[in-house]
Image: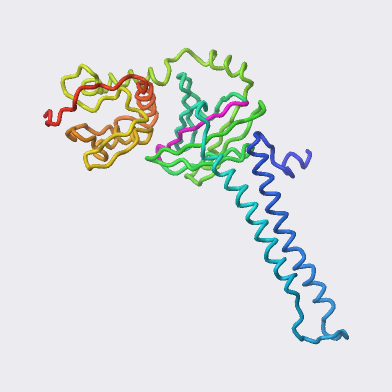
Amino acid sequence: MSLDRFVSLWPEQGSHYAEQVDWLVIGFTGMMALFVVPVFVFLWIFVFRYRRGRAALRDHRPDGSLKVEITWMLLPFIGALVLFVYSARLFFEARTPPADALEIQVTAKQWMWKFQHHGGQREINTLHVPAERAVKLTMISEDVIHSLFLPSLRVKQDVLPGRYTQMWFQAERPGTYDLYCAEYCGTDHAAMGARLVVLSPSDYQRWLEGAGDAPSLAAQGEALFRQFGCSGCHAVASVTRAPPLQGLYGRSVALADGSRVVADDAYLRDSILLPQKQVVAGYAPVMPTYTHVMDEEAVARLVAYIRSLADTPPDPSPPHTEDPQ
C-alpha cells in the first residue's frame, strides 16, 4: 500500500478560504526561515572557525554597522505588519457570514453531530451542502464542549453548552470531506466524526427533494409552539398577555432593568430556557422555564418559528403591566 495514503505533504483545499490560509502559513514560515536560518548558519560557521586549537583572530573590539542593524529591525517589522494585516482580514472574513448564507442548525452530543436544515431535513453525522454557496452553521452542545473542525476548509469553531456559536464556509468543489471534533469530549471523542458532502446546486436540490417531505423547521416550531401552550400567552388573541412575537426577531427590546438587547437567536433561546434572565419591560416575570422540558433541537425549531414572524407587523396594543396570576 502506498505511503501517500497515510502521509499527505499538503492537505486538500476545499475552498478559496483554505487557499488563503495556506498562503498565510507559507508566508509566515518563509519569513521565519528568512531570519532564523541565517542565525544558525553563521552560528555553525563561527563554531567551526573559532573552535579550540584553531589559529584565528580573536580580537573582540566592537565593530558594527548602523545601517545593518536598522535594516535587521525594519525588515522583520514590515514583514510582521504585512502578515498581521493579511491575517486580520482573514479573521474578519471568517467571522462575517454573507447575509444570504444557507443556515443550518447543528447540535453536538456525545458522540454525534446532528444537523437540521430549514426545510425540515435532518441528518446525523452527515451534512449535505451545495457547492459555491455560503453556508452558516448555528451550533450548540447538549452536554460538554465540542469543536467542529473541517480541515479541508481550514475552519474550526468550538461548540458550547448553553450558548450559540456560529461558523460559515463556502466549499468550491463537490466532494466528500472529513469533519472532526477537535475538542476532547469524553471516552469516544476520537470516534466523533462526520462527513461533509458537497453537491452541485442541481444535485443538492434533488437531494432536498428526496430527503423526505417533513415540515419546514419553522412549521415544526409552530407545532411545538401550540403543543407546549406558548400560544396561550403569546398569541395576539390570548387573554393572558405576554411580549408579542410578531416582528420581534432582530428588533431592539427594552428590558425591565432599563437596558436594551437585540432579539437574536441567543436572546430567544434564553427567553425560552431562562425566562427570568432578561425580563421585558412592562411585563411580569411569570413565564415558566422550559429547561429539561425541551432539548436543544426543539428550541432551535421554536426559534426558527419566531424568526419566521420577523416580517409580521408587531402588535400595536400596549403591554399589560399587572401580574396575570
| Residue 33 belongs to the span the image colors magenta | no
Q: Where is residue 96 in the image (x, y as percent from the top left)?
A: 51, 37
| Residue 292 seen from this side | no
Q: In this view, does 207 lie above or below 138?
A: above
From the top left corner, tell me how far across and down residue 95 is, in percent: 51, 40
Direction from residue 2 to residue 99 in the image, left or right: left
Question: Percent position (x, y) of residue 137?
Answer: 49, 32
Residue 33: quarter of image: bottom right
Q: Determine which quarter of the picture holds residue 45.
A: bottom right
At 77% from the left edge and 65% from the top edge, which residue is drawn? Answer: 38
- Who is closer to the viewer here, 214 or 283? 283
Q: Does the magenta stretch include residue 138?
A: yes
Residue 1 vertical placement versus 237 (above, below): below
Residue at figure coordinates x 60%, y 27% from the top left: 197
Of residue 222 and residue 39, the one placed in the foreground of this image is: 39
> Which residue is drawn at the image coordinates 72% and 73% (left, top)?
66
Q: Quadrant of the C terminus?
A: top left
User: In x, y percent, where is residue 51?
Assistant: 82, 81
Residue in view at x 44 percent, y 15 percent? 214
Q: In this picture, which residue range is highlighted in magenta? A: 132-143
Instruction: Answer with the quarter of the image where residue 294 lies.
Output: top left
